[in-house]
Image (cartoon, grey):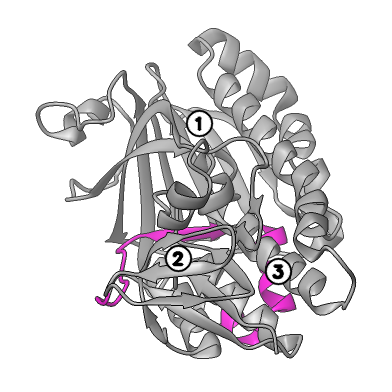
Amino acid sequence: MTRVLIAGAGIAGLATRIALAAHGIRADLAERDPAPRDGGTGLYLPANAVRALAGLGLADAVEKHSVPIERQEIRDSTGAVLTSYGLKGVWGDVGESRALSRTALHGLLLDAAGPPTHPGVREASPDGTVTFTDGSESRYDIVIGADGIDSAVRRSAFPAARPRFLGQVCWRFLYEAKQSTTWSVLLGDRGRSLLTVPVGDGQVYCFAAIDSTTQAPPPGDWRDLFADFATDVPHHDAHFAPLREITGDDWVAGTVVLVGDAAHACSPSMAQGGAMALEDALVLASTLGDGQPSPLARYRARRAGRIRFVLEQNHRRDNARNLPGFARRLLFRHFGLRLVRANHAGLLDRP
C-alpha cells in the first residue's frame, strides 16, 4: 500500500484528502496549528471553485452554507458605476458563483476529510523522509505539501521557490449588514480598492488593499486611508497581511509535490487562490489513482498551463485597476465585461 502524507489541514490539504479517499487512497494528515481555524474572513467562490467542490461531493453542503453571487459591480471611489454585469455572462454553463465565511468552508471540508493525525511537518526530503514538529521522523512514498504560502515543505524541498511581495498590503474582516447577491468593489488611486461581498448569516466580507513599498502595516489607523471612499462599510478591526505570490511550476521534487498556496500563491484579484487549490486536489488525486506511471510529473504537466494563465490574468487585472482614474473609467465603462470574460476564458473547461 502506498503511504501518503498531506502536510497542512487548510483548504488545499483537506480537499486533497477527500479527493484521494474517493480514489481509494488513504492519506495521513499533518497540521502544525493545534488551534481551530476561524480566520474571521470570507471567501468568494467563482464558478470553477463551486464546480470543484461539487467534484469533491460537497455540492449540497456548500449550497446550504453559502449564498449565491449573481452580479459584480466595479465603481470608482465616489461610488459611480464603471461597469456592472451578471456572472452568468462570464461563466455560462459552468454554474453559479457563491460566497461563504472561511470558517464555514473549512468546517465543511474538515467534516468530510476527518481530523489531522500527525503534528506539523518541519522538514520534508525528496526521498519522502519527513521530520515532524515533535522531532519524530517517518518515511512516505508520497509527501504532499499543502501547508500554505509559508510552507515548511517548500522551504526544505524547494529552497529556490520563495514568495514575492506584490507591492500591496490588505485588511480583511467580516461585518454585519443587509444581504444582497452582488459582489462590489470601489477603486481609488494608489492602488486602493475596497471590496464587499455577502457571505450569509447576515455577514458581509470586506477586503481593503493599498499599494505599499513595505510589507509592514502603514502607520496610523488603516481606515483613514479609505476615508474619502463613498461607502457605508463600518470602521472595524481587521486582519492585516502583505500580498505575495509564488510563480513558476517547480512543484515536484522526487516524491514531494506541492499544492495550493504552497505551490502557487497568487494575487486575490481574481479570487482564484481557493479555486486553484480545490482543482489541484482533484487533479492530483486522479493522477495518483489512475495506476499510470509518473503520476507527479503528469500532475505538474496538467496544472502548469492553467496556473500560468491565472497568474497572468491576475497581473492584467491588477494593472487595469491601477490605471489613472480617467483611463480606468474609459476602460471599464466601454470594455468591462469583455475584459472580465477574457480573464476567465481559460477556466471554463474542467481542469
- Residue 222 or 124: which is nearer the viewer? 124
Considering depth in this image, is 152 or 227 the residue closer to the camera? Answer: 152
Left or right of 276? Residue 215 is left
- Tell me the kind of residue under disc 1: Arg
Q: CA distance from mark 3 to mark 1?
A: 30 Å
Is tag 3's residue or tag 1's residue first in the polypeptide sequence?
3
Percent x, y for residue 227? 22, 28
Decide if residue 80 is on the left or right side of residue 167: right
- Residue 172 at x, y percent in the picture: 32, 49
User: The C terminus lies in which quarter of the figure?
Assistant: bottom right
Q: Mark 2 or mark 1, which is nearer the start of the sequence?
A: 1
Who's the residue at 29% across and 77% down the image? Answer: 36
Q: Identify which amino acid the numbered label 2 is placed on.
A: Val
Whether pointer 1 and pointer 2 mark residues with C-beta atoms closer than 8 Å, the reply is no
- The local crowd at label 1, few if under 14, some if 14 to 19, many if 20 or more residues have their Cα within 10 Å, is many
* Above or below: residue 262 compared with residue 40: above
Which mark lies nearer to you, 1 or 2? 2
Report the mark closest to the observer, 3 or 2: 3
In which quarter of the view is residue 62 placed? Answer: bottom right
Residue wearing tag 1: 75
> What range of the chain is rendered magenta?
34-63
Residue 181, by quadrant, is bottom right
Is 46 inside the magenta-drawn segment? yes
The residue singled out by tag 2 in the image is 199
Image x and y of residue 38, in percent: 30, 71
Viewer-nearest of labels 3 and 1?
3
Q: Which residue is found at the position 27% from the left and 24% from the top?
A: 228
Name the quarter where the N terminus is drawn.
Answer: bottom right
Q: Find disc 3 in the rendering and name its residue.
A: 52
- Residue at 63 percent across and 88 percent down: it is 26
Q: Amino acid at mark 3?
A: Ala
Determine crowd level at label 3: few under 14, some 14-19, many 20+ residues with C-alpha closer than 10 A: many
